[in-house]
Image: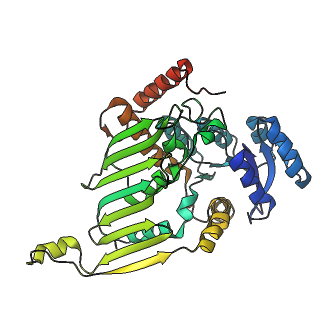
Amino acid sequence: MEKVRFGIVGIGKMGSLHCLRFTHGLIKNGTLTAVCDISPERKEWAEKNLKAKGVEFFDDYKSLIDSGKADAVLVATPHYDHPVIATYALSKGLHTLIEKPAGVYTKAIRELNEYAATKPELTFGIMYNQRTNKLYRFAKELVETGRLGEMKRINWIITNWYRPQAYYNQGGWRGTWAGEGGGVLINQCPHQLDLFQWLGGMPSMIRGYAKVGRNRDINVENDVTAYMEYPNGATGVFITSTHDFPGTNRLEIDGDKGKIVIENNKLVFTELEVAESVFNATNKKFMPSIPSHKIVKRMSKVGELAMNVFAQHTGIINNFTNHIVNGEPLIAPGADGIRGLTISNAIHLSSWTGEAVELPIDEDKFIAELEKRKAEEKESSKKKVQ
C-alpha cells in the first residue's frame, strides 16, 4: 500500500483539525479521501475546505465505511459513539484510529478490544498524543530501564484546565452525563490518566472524591481528588479541576533510586548514587543525605509549539499510518484505551458509592450508577442535552 486512504468520522473542532493535517501534507503516508458528519454546518465547512481536494462527504458513518473510499477511519465523534463506530469499521475491514477517550465505560471498551483482537490484520490505535512528548518519553525510559527503581509514590496535580461557565454554555452536550458521560475526568484528563498508568502502572484500589458542579452550573464533576494503592505497596494521588485559576500541572514520581518531577515544560530527575533501600540498610548517621545528582531536560516555547503542531496529534496519525505501511511499532495501541478509562470509572464509582473500589471494577454496577445520573438529569432543572 503506497498511501493509506483515510476517512474521518466527525469533523467538529478536533476532526476538522485532523482534516487540515492531511490537506496540508503533514501525513506522509496518508491521504484524506472522505469525511462524515451529521451537522449541516460541518457539511458546509467540508464543501468549502475539502471538496476541491477530492474529499467526499457522507452524512452517515456506515455509508462512509461501506463506500470503499477509505482503508482506515479516524473516529472523532462524541465519546459514547467511539466504540460503536470503531467496532463497525473493524468489522468492515478498515484500520481504525479513535480519539480519546476510548469511550465512556469500560464494558464497551473491553468488548471493543476483544473484537479488535480477532482482527490482527487490522491496525487499531488511539489518539494518546501526549505519549509523543519527549519529557514523558524520557520519564518512561527512566521507569522501564530501572533507573528510577521500584515506585513508591506517584502524584499528579493537574488543575490548569480552567473552564468558565461560558465554555459549558457553548454546547448543549457539554457538562452533561448524557452528552459527555462525565466532566473533567472524561473530557480534559484522559491523556493524563493514560500517562498516569503508562508511567506508574495500574493501581489495585482507588478511593475517589468527585465534586459535581463546583462553582459551575453543570451536572458533572469538575473537581476531583483520588487516592490509589498499588500491588507493591506504592500509593498515588490524582487531583484535577476546571475551576481553579491559576492552575498547576505537576507530576512527581518517587522511586527507590530517585525522583522525577515534570512541571513547566521541564523534567528534573534526581538520581541517587545508591538506592535508598541499600543506603538505609547500611547507614549509621541520625539524619543523613543520600548522595545524588540531577538530570534536567527542558522544552523551549519554540519546541513546545513544534511538538503541538508536528509531534503530537500529527505524530500519532503518522505513526498509525506508518504501522500500516511498514510495521512501525505503535506508540498508542487501541487496546491501551481501557486502562486510563478504568481509573476514571473507578474514581466515579467510588465517589458515587462512598466506598473504595478494587480493580478490576464492577462494570455493570458502574453502568447502573451512570444510568441513574442520566435519568436524574432528564428530570433536573439544570442543564440538559439539547
Classify residue 383 by image quadrant.
Answer: top right
Residue at image location 50% in from the left, 34% down from the top: 220
Taking the image as shown, residue 326 lies to the left or right of residue 193, namely right
Q: Is residue 179 visible?
A: yes
- Position of the C terminus, as image quadrant, is top right
* In the foreground, 188 or 322: 188
x and y, in percent, of residue 193 in the image:
46, 51
Vertical comparison of 190 with 313: above or below: above
x and y, in percent, of residue 16 in the image:
75, 50
Taking the image as shown, residue 363 lies to the left or right of residue 302, namely left
Vertical comparison of 243 with 172: above or below: below
Taking the image as shown, residue 245 lies to the left or right of residue 233, namely right
- Position of the N terminus, as image quadrant, is bottom right
Give the farthest residue toward the right. 52
| Number of numbered callouts drawn | 0
Residue at image location 86% in from the left, 42% down from the top: 44
Q: Is residue 73 visible?
A: no
Taking the image as shown, residue 127 lies to the left or right of residue 66, namely left
Vertical comparison of 382 with 206: above or below: above
